[in-house]
Image: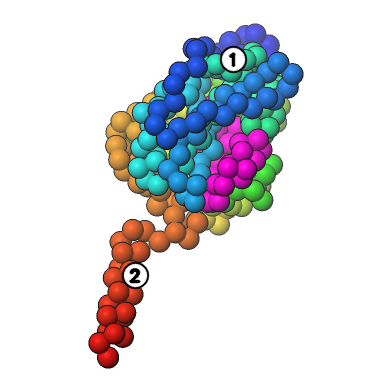
Amino acid sequence: MDRPEITNVLFHPVQVPRNTPPQNAVDIDVQVEENVTIACRLYSADPAAPTIIFFHGNGEIIPDYDAIGPMYVRERLNFLVTEYRGYGWSTGMPLTSTLLADSNTVFLSARQWLNDHGYTGSLFVMGRSLGSASAIDVAVNHSELIDGLIIESGFAKTLPLAAVLGIDLEQLGITEEQTFNNSAKIATFTKPTYILHGQYDQLIQLWQAETLHAQCDAKQKELQVVPRADHNSLIAVAGPLYFQEIRKFIEKVAGIAPDWRERRRQFKEKQAQVAGKTS
């Protein structure tokens, strides 16, 4: 899978200098091996809030999320974006053989950083497109450390996706089991899972998401198809609902009461206090 004819299609690294993090964001660098450092950026809402550790899609970089991260923050969610080798200001060269190992190392280091800096909320792993392979692998390997899994525009089978990209992996003697093997991995995952996919995704067709949902062994799982959306337009089409629905899933899993319930509880408590004083 590290053959140039494969990696040149799977990876489209964009390299840029480190930019200044936006307000309420901080950069975290993770060394995955000697002379190889992976960049991360945390958009922080509150240390007590839930945190999403996010693996982005191919051709994307951290600064692409400088406008999206604050939208998670507005939903009272911490959003931690991770890079891959050779992307953004991360060093090294992206390879299929190192992608998943790096993702697990970055996850563990990011979790440790969160713990060290007083972040106590529930923890979720999320992956988009290529990042679905990283997120699923991390979720399966460290299920005891996370509360749930979120997949956007993810794939179940690598060989059909490679064919869409113009690579016949089977002709190269590569089987599905020798690839990311997402469908087999998610079949062993039992934590709550939320899958989002565009109705008209032209790159990773909807059946891939349906397969992930069917294969997932979680009792609490949901597939949300965004009407009229394609591979890269889920947020543009869904708008604020995209973030609100993710927040609702997280609140349900984490046992966090929505705002209206919390306000109603506080109102009733005040009423009881007033009644107690006047009795």
Percent x, y for residue 2? 69, 15
SS for callout 2: helix
SS for callout 1: loop
Colour style of the rendered protein structure: rainbow
Mark 2 lies on residue: 265
Point 45% across, 39% down: residue? 44
Q: Amino acid at mark 1?
A: Gly
Using the image, determine if residue 39 lies above or below residue 190.
Answer: above
Q: Residue extending furthest bottom?
A: 279
Decide whether residue 120 is among the magenta residues: yes
Q: Quadrant of the N terminus?
A: top right
Give the quadrant of residue 130: top right
> Of the numbered discs in the image, which one, if any, rests on residue 86?
1
Q: Amino acid at mark 2?
A: Arg
Q: Residue extending furthest top?
A: 4
* Sequence-first disc among 2 and 1: 1
Q: Residues within 10 Å of mark 1 (few under 14, many from 20)?
A: many
Q: Quadrant of the C terminus?
A: bottom left
> Of the numbered discs in the image, which one, if any, rests on residue 26?
none
Point 57% across, 29% down: residue? 28
Magenta residues, start to end? 108-136
Distance in Å between CA atoms under marks 2 and 1: 50 Å
Point 45% across, 46% down: residue? 46
Percent x, y for residue 221? 50, 51
Percent x, y for residue 249? 44, 51
